[in-house]
Image: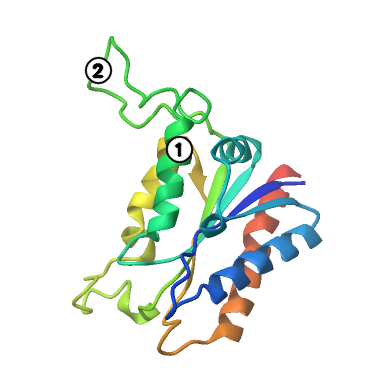
Amino acid sequence: MTKIHILNGAQPYAFAPGALNETLANLAKTTLEAQGHEVRLTIVAQGYDVEAEVENHLWADVVLLQFPVNWMGVPWSFKKYMDEVYTVGMDGRLSDGDGRSASAPKANYGMGGKLAGTRYMISATLNAPAEAFDDPDEPFFEGMSLDDLLRPVHLNAKFFGMTPLPSFGAFDVMKNPDVEGDLSRFELHLATTFGGLANEAA
């Protein structure tokens, strides 16, 4: 049984109340629980206890980050969560400093994480269409992938020693939504990803 901590990092707005992210987070919870995993869910915009969230990270085998991409990054309330929770965790629980030592003050920055063995998975929703990514002829992202765009999120996780699982993206969700298709793809992504973890454990 895998212990999974889901973070719903959506910030509700009148034009985007966060229904799809809520649906994806809840689908992940019910699907993974049905597979026999133990799941905890935090809805960031509803508030959280910082100490409890540090403990959730220590408890989890996998942290699933569910959020909409707002202005090329995570919503402000999710960034606030990271600022508060991860800063408190710098007391030695999530990270032993920034990885540098007095004997080598310029080396190994970012390598002090204490969550080695913990995996994480990004599941993001975007207004941008999938065709805007991975195509050098598209002028905005210029060939970038979704993971390239979300590199700061990946680096945050790496700072604490976590390793990535394959990311999931639901694209074009405002102008050309395909909710049924997104949910079907997400269920398959969960089955493939967490089935792979079960095979590793076996």
Does residue 166 appear anywhere in the picture? Answer: no
- Label 1: which secondary element: helix
- Where residue 85 appears, as percent x and y from the top left, is 48, 39
x 70%, y 58%: residue? 195
Which is closer to the viewer, label 1 or label 2? Answer: 1
Tag 2 residue: 105
Is 135 above or below relative to 31?
below
Q: Position of residue 137 (x, y in %)?
A: 21, 79
Q: Is residue 164 left or right of residue 141?
A: right
Q: Nearer the viewer, residue 123 or 41?
A: 41
Taking depth in this image into account, of 180 and 174 the one nearest to the observer is 174
Q: Which mark is residue 86?
A: 1
Q: How far is mark 1 from mark 2, CA to CA?
A: 22 Å
Residue 69 makes an appearance in the image:
yes
Q: Label 2 is placed on what type of residue? A: Pro
What's the amino acid at mark 1? Answer: Tyr
